[in-house]
Image (spheres, grey):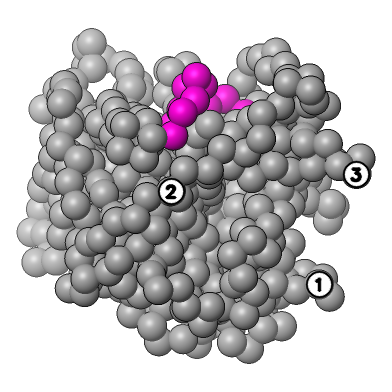
Amino acid sequence: MRSILLLGAALLASPLLAQDRKEEPKAEKTADIPPPQIVTKRMSGTFGGQRVDYVATAGEIQLKGDDGAPRAVINYYSYVKEPRDPNRPVTFLFNGGPGSGSVWLHMGAFGPKRVAIPSDARDDGAPPYPIVDNPDSLLDATDIVFIDPVGTGFSHVVGKGETKDYWGVTKDAQSVAKVIRLWLNENGRWNSPKFLGGESYGTTRSAAVANELEGSYNDVGLNGIILISTILDFGAQAEVEGNDMPYIISLPSYAAVAWYHNKVPNKPGTVEQFVAEARAFAIGPYASALMKGQALQGAERDQVRTQLARYSGLSEAFLERTDLRPSPGRFWKELLRDRGLTVGRLDSRYTGRDRDSAGEEMDNDPSFYGIDAGYTAAINAYLRDTMGFKSERSYVTIGNVQPWDWDLGRGEGTYYKSVAPYIGKALRENSGLRVFVGQGYYDFATPFFGAEYALSRTGFPQDRIVWKYYEAGHMMYVRDEDRRKLSSDIRAFIRSR
């Protein structure tokens, strides 16, 4: 179970998940800091049906202190169409964690090359892993800059820099915003249409970075924010005793996964239809029942339990033992227990087989160990061999960036942390800004109903939020059909500005 918690914190850190504090890495002395490394290659490819000539850059940007000395080195990977056009859109992308490098979006979805792992929720096996041309890259519609924040990829502190200066919601956002401003300076792109996007905690980062870019008079105006597998409101989804919201938010995801694995009697023809039914039940009878607490008794309790069994795929006997509050961890283990299988957290299409079938929660997440080796090999082979970027450091795909500072400076208290208001404010104060939200039905790291809840509160102009759904999980692009759909959806979002 500890391995699951550590993995969960790495892919989607929560204020409530504690990890052992590790000694912070020591930075180099200022005199030993080499100049930024920048390598470029001219390349061509066909993306979105268009032939594009572009310059690929694997580079470093130094963030400096007030004394002008470097404090951190941030790695970025940019793809800029030739001939250069200062009015062409540019999109800044990163992953989440908060300790995750941009490898997943880079080598899985939007970079000009991608790693070809199985599309049908099978394990990626052993190397070699095919690194292939990616016609689904967005390069026909926008230039792209992938960013690895401090503690991810090759990015690290130097000189007098300390990780505590960068590891936190606001500190991290400030450093990424600085990188974006510096890149705009160096590339003459201040008047270009600008899009900002991330996956998982990267959506949290997107909200916080947007606040840093647009929240002062020295604005960097944005045309769009791209949220993929969204987590904004950590308070609503905090699995702490007494908080019933996580059960409500998880139920539509339970329904989708139960539908996928044929655990629903007389199931509807589409997952969308069944999810719509589960949504209505979750925010209606189920939410009302949980609010009644121990006063829920008799026929009403029986009726809610029967409906909950249908939408979750779990037995009424099991649900009664959970007091009608099945946690996601229990669901992953229980749904296919009769088949001796567990379902994945990141993508519940994946199944795994634990050491035995008697446990309460799964040993490990089959949807992560089913993809991690391929992505790690691909990013290292591409950057080191194809691009010629030299580094003795290990590329950190998923790192331990603890302790992470969750304080937003708004008096949220210990548990309630939400960056969603940053997006609402940005939409209200920038009439040209729109938001794209892409969610996988089979994603438990960031359940789609959590995003719907966070972005439907007071203060969010609903007519400028675009919703798209995919029949895969957290990294929906590992499924070939959904990678193509995601690419097409975001390409249309960018071009419709």
Foreground tag (2 vs 3)? 2
Q: Which residue is mark 2?
A: 40
Q: Is residue 375 rendered to the left or right of residue 325? A: left
* Callout 1 touching callout 3 (CB < 8 Å): no
- Inspect the magenta stretch and tell me whether residue 399 lies in it: yes
Magenta region: 389-401
Q: Nearer the viewer, mark 1 or mark 2?
A: 2
- Direction from residue 207 to residue 213 in the image, left or right: right
- Estimate how packed mark 3 is, as few (under 14), some (14 to 19) or many (20 or more) residues with alpha carbons within 10 Å: few
**Image: 450 above or below 243:** below
Q: Quadrant of residue 207?
A: bottom right
Q: Nearer the viewer, residue 378 or 28?
A: 28
Local secondary structure at mark 2: strand
Q: Nearer the viewer, residue 210 or 60?
A: 60
Q: Which residue is mark 3?
A: 66
Q: Residue at x 31, y 72 (%)?
A: 140
Disc number for residue 339: none
Say whether disc 1 or disc 2 marks the residue closer to the N-terminus: 2
Prevailing secondary structure of the magenta residues:
loop
**Which residue position is annotated with label 1?**
218
